[in-house]
Amino acid sequence: MESSRFNPIEQPFPDAEPLSIAGSTCECYRVRLYGKLHFLKRLRPEFRTSPRHVAALRKEFETGYTLSHQGLVGYASLTPDGILMDYVDGQTLREFVRDNPEYLHQRSNADRFLQQLLDVVGYLHAHQVVHLDLKPENILITRIGHYVKIIDLGYCLTDTYADTPGRTDRYAAPEQFTGKALDVRTDIYAIGQILQELPCADMYRKIAERCTADDPKERFQSTDEIVRAMHRRKPVAMWVAGSLLLAVLVVGALWWTLHTQQASTSPVTSADSATTTTLGDTVLQSSVAARPMAGDLMKPNGYMPTAEKTVGATTETTKTQSYDTLRLRREIQAVLTPLFEKQMGSYRSIDYDQMTTADLERFSHAGIAFRKSTFPLLNDFRQKHADRYPSVLIGEEWYETEKMLEVTLLWQMKRNNPNHDPIYDKKTYRYYGDASN
């Protein structure tokens, strides 16, 4: 082994405070140096003359000293028989789970923990470092913010240090026992073993099973692959969120239909499929069949109600005024589109299938907030155009425009995923033609 370019510093620590987080070969202390707390890791007396353990400690320092990541403890200097590191106020993962048994039962907390763990392990791999001793005792959770910190690079594999003197059998991959080549997939095996012990094990069952495959070729080949699998594992949550959004749209449609019909026909009586309004000796009967459904209103001018006028014993059916629905639609779009872009436009570049549960919840709330914000605009629009369009037609076109804006946005978000289902898109947008136009 080549000689180290770092020289140990002589530094007495008379006030060193022993810590309980000690390993089988080292003792750990909290010390104060130049007013700052540090973590001192020293070999136990029986190992201080062992060349193998002394070399492992020096290897850990020289490897860690060159790395810089918020998920790694910082290495300060060597001592005659140990390493001086930045002090981390926290607990080992095992202690943290013991004292906070419900924390990792929450999906958002579990996702955050796993994402941070994968991020720092991926950083090690990107710098040609394989940890080889990932376990709950080597993962710290900070007291402030509950951030992940990885410690103990004594058994790591690097381009410079190929000697890996030990392992923890409970988390070691099969190749660590057989002497076969070790690589990043060896760490991925340990991550799977750790996941199977945690309260969130059921959430990541399939991920953990693939991580712990005996054959390295069958495991995830990188931490990035695990991250992608995390994002793909929420189809149920996404369908629930989508269903809730659809339910809100349907309820909104029913509410607007009832509201606008009541506003435009008072007093009313219902007989079969007709609504009758009495005005003196004139009976106006608005035929439901003559008024198109909301989906048909998206087609060129189609709204032309009929009326029956009864004078004495004579009844005649006449066509009332027809309305330019295309023009109405453009006027409504001119009002709603700027507001929609302001409140929802930021989602246009997001891949819907990659959204987390929290992202979907925020997206749903944003859609609800948008629809609420349009209520006063609709009332103003009705008053402004009361002499040109019936209230019911304005309400139907208003709702259809809102729905078109939201569904088109969802379609664009789905298109951001190269694996989107074009058949599903075709079914969803059959009322709107080609949404890409």
Image (cartoon, rainbow, N blue to C red):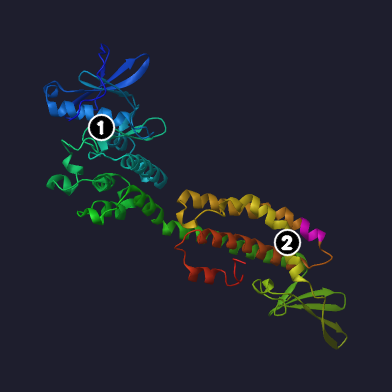
Magenta stretch: residue 427 in it?
no
Q: Secondary structure at mark 1?
A: loop
Write down the residue under mark 1: 152
Residue 377 sits in quarter: bottom right
Hey, which quadrant is residue 21 in on the image? top left
Q: State left or right for residue 403 relative to residue 426.
A: right
Q: Amino acid at mark 2?
A: Ile
Q: Are marks 2 and 1 in contact (CB under 8 Å)?
A: no
Structural distance between the alpha carbons of marks 2 and 1: 63 Å
Q: Position of residue 146 (x, y in %)?
A: 39, 35
Q: Amino acid at mark 1?
A: Asp
Q: Is residue 102 visible?
A: no
Looking at the image, which is closer to me, 338 or 128? 128
Task: Please report the residue visible at 73 percent of the width from the left and 61 percent of the height from the top.
Answer: 332
Span colored in magenta: 380-384
Q: Position of residue 96 (x, y in %)?
A: 31, 35
| Above or below, comparing residue 376 to residue 253 in the picture | above
| Residue 42 horizontal/vertical position (percent) | 21, 22
Quadrant (top left/top right/bottom left/bottom right) for the C terminus: bottom right
Image disc number at residue 332: 2
- Binning the other alpha carbons within 10 Å of mark 2 as few (below 14), some (14 to 19) or many (20 upward) gives many
The residue most toward the bottom is 313
Counting residues from the N terminus, which is met first, the one under dot 2 or under dot 1? 1
